[in-house]
Image (cartoon, rainbow, N blue to C red):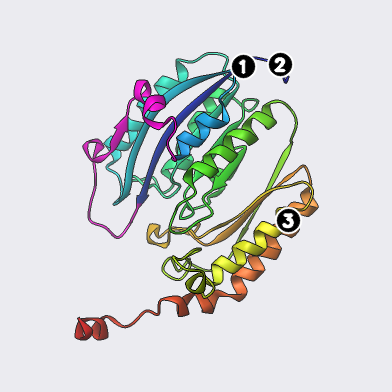
Amino acid sequence: MGGKNLKIVLGGFGAESNAFSLERPGLRDAVVTAEAELIPTNQGRRTVIGGFIEALESSRVKVLPLPRIWWGAIGVIEGKAYNRAKSLLLRRLRGYADIDGVLLDLHGAMQAEGVEDAEGVLLKDVRKIVGRKTPVVCVVDSHANMTDLKMANADLIIPYKTNPHIDLYERGLKAGGLLLKLIDGEIHPTSHLERLPMLGNNLGMSTWATTPEMQSHLPLSGIMAKAAELEKEANVLDISIVIGFGQADIPQSVTSVLAITNSDEELVKRMAVEVATLVWEARDDFFKVRPLIPVDEAIDKA
């Protein structure tokens, strides 16, 4: 299949929904990039979609844009707004025939009224349109909630590896490259998600700091370095630590480790469990990075 001309669809859809917020944002609160603007506004930029575009820069690839609809960090999306936005993206997708693959820039922690896993539902709907034979690859935030619905409807999920997030472009680039290898039959990915019985401590789970000395005190930075070493093993395609988003207040918002190998089920589980064990063993250390104090004490200090 290496010489086949390919048609790849790109789009985006995301929010980081805090279930405890009283906000019910509508479509007017989203940043909407129309499909006609998706390529020119991202080409050459260090965004997820910028990474997608660079990975697909080839005379044999035709890029077919969808809208990118993004709310960012916000409350639970108004039900009508979510349905309207999702319908817009899916309608554009249905307008493309004989596509070879789909690349989506998602957040992974979106909720809408009555929908706990809004991006998982989107992926399920995308899968219904393109079928099981067309690969669907997505990039998600490291605060994504790795639900069963997402895992069942994406061929590959590539989470950010940094917190704060500075690797959007790199993860988009990797996702695009893996999609092409998947289409060409060069890889046959196997994923394993190892969930941990813990809610991610966002403040304590930073992966980098402004100086090497400060970074040396970040436990997750050291664990990520060990995961990077494991990625060098033959047939390991990716290992990511997904912090999750506890403010989503759903059962599957826990911290997890996602490993991907090239058709090696024993290896993929071993890699995920090994890194997950390191995260679990460091769970108390995360709270030492930026210690939390009681509300009354914080008010007194203020």
The amino acid pointed to by label 1 is Arg
3D distance between C-alphas at marks 1 and 2: 8 Å
Q: Are marks 1 and 2 in contact (CB under 8 Å)?
A: yes
Q: Position of residue 205 (x, y in %)?
A: 48, 67
Q: Position of residue 101 (x, y in %)?
A: 58, 25
Quarter of the image where the C terminus is located: bottom left
Identified at 77% across, 46% down, the residue is 235
Asked which secondary structure carries label 2, the reply is: loop
Q: Which residue is mark 1?
A: 60
Identified at 51% across, 50% down, the residue is 160
Give neighbour class at mark 2: few <14, some 14-19, many 20+ (Cα, 10 Å).
few
The amino acid pointed to by label 2 is Gly
In the picture provided, is 268 more to the left or to the right than 244?
right
3D distance between C-alphas at marks 1 and 3: 35 Å
Residue 272 visible somewhere in the drawing: yes
Front-most of 263 and 82? 263
The mark that comes first in sequence, 3 or 2, is 2
Residue interval drawn in magenta? 17-46
Front-most of 51 and 183? 51
Q: Which residue is mark 3?
A: 269
Q: Which residue is mark 2?
A: 3
